[in-house]
Amino acid sequence: MDYKIVERILSVSPNFLLEKDLIHSGYSIIAGVDEVGRGPLAGPVTAAAVILDPLNIPDNLNDSKLLSLKKREKIYEELMYSSTFAIAHVSPEEIDKLNILQASLLAMVNAVSKLNVTPNHVLIDGNKIPEQLGGMATAIVKGDSKVASIAAASIIAKVTRDRLMRDLDSDFPVYEWAKNSGYPTKCHMNAILKYGITPHHRRSFRPIHNILCG
């Protein structure tokens, strides 16, 4: 894809202009892809692939991290009814085997493959394109704050993962995952030191690895 076109379109953000340009170029089905959960010490990395309906795009799409919980949940519910989407998780065990970068790329590939329609082109947040999507994808740095489809994917991925961590919190309340989503907060680290790790912790991450190695 012509990166001069990308640069021009992304001068106003977030918006659906890049998708429109691709549609006008003959790509009828455009999916935005994003992942969440690279930094936590516990839980999966989660990716979402989203195909927006050009005639029914929710208002206020943005990078999920820039939205309040209330706004994020509201847009998530709207996307459930107005878009085509798929979600994929890569487990802590797989993260430990692959490393977090490869696990994140795998989650993106799996999310795209789970869509019930095959996209003609994929817009990916970040600067790396999974090998399996090469030739049919464009990587956009900070795409979740520039491109509507990627912003939608970031919202669906984050809400899904946060809800999953809240569910896990009911079984492991001492780690307060409902509040920290598995990130290394002071409370989470203190709980690890006091109670040890769970099957949901990422053993290859340095803080956990250091504790396990004594």
Image (cartoon, rainbow, N blue to C red):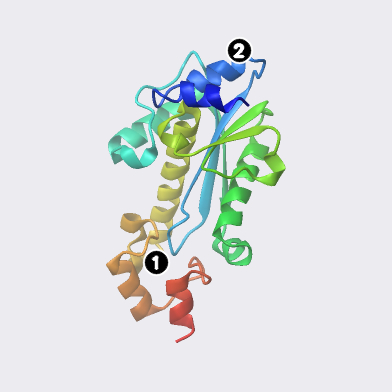
Give how far across and how far down residue 183 sits, in percent: 38, 60
Quadrant in the rendering for residue 211:
bottom left
Residue 172 pos. (x, y %): 39, 66
- Disc 1: which residue: 172
Q: Quadrant of the N terminus?
A: top right
Q: Is 6 on the left or on the right of 40, as rendered?
A: right
21 left or right of 28 in image:
left
Q: Is residue 70 above or below residue 212?
A: above
Task: Quadrant for residue 130, please give it.
Answer: top right
For residue 20, above or below residue 132 = above
Residue that sits furthest to the front in the current view: 4
Residue 161 image point, x, y percent:
45, 49
Q: Is 68 drawn above or below residue 168 in the view shown?
A: above
Count the numbered circles shown.
2
Mark carried by residue 133: none
The amino acid beneath tag 1 is Phe
Relative to 40, residue 186 above or below: below
Element assignment for label 1 = loop
Q: Residue at x 44, y 36 (%)?
A: 144
Name the residue at 40% across, 60% down: 182
| Residue 52 appears anywhere in the view | no
Tell me the crowding category of disc 2: few under 14, some 14 to 19, or many 20 or more residues within 10 angstroms, Cα based.
Answer: few
Q: List the single residue furthest toward the bottom.
A: 214
**Quarter the C terminus occupies:** bottom left
Of 99 and 50, the residue lying toward us: 99
Residue underneath mark 2: 24
User: Sequence order check: which comes first, mark 1 or mark 2?
Assistant: 2
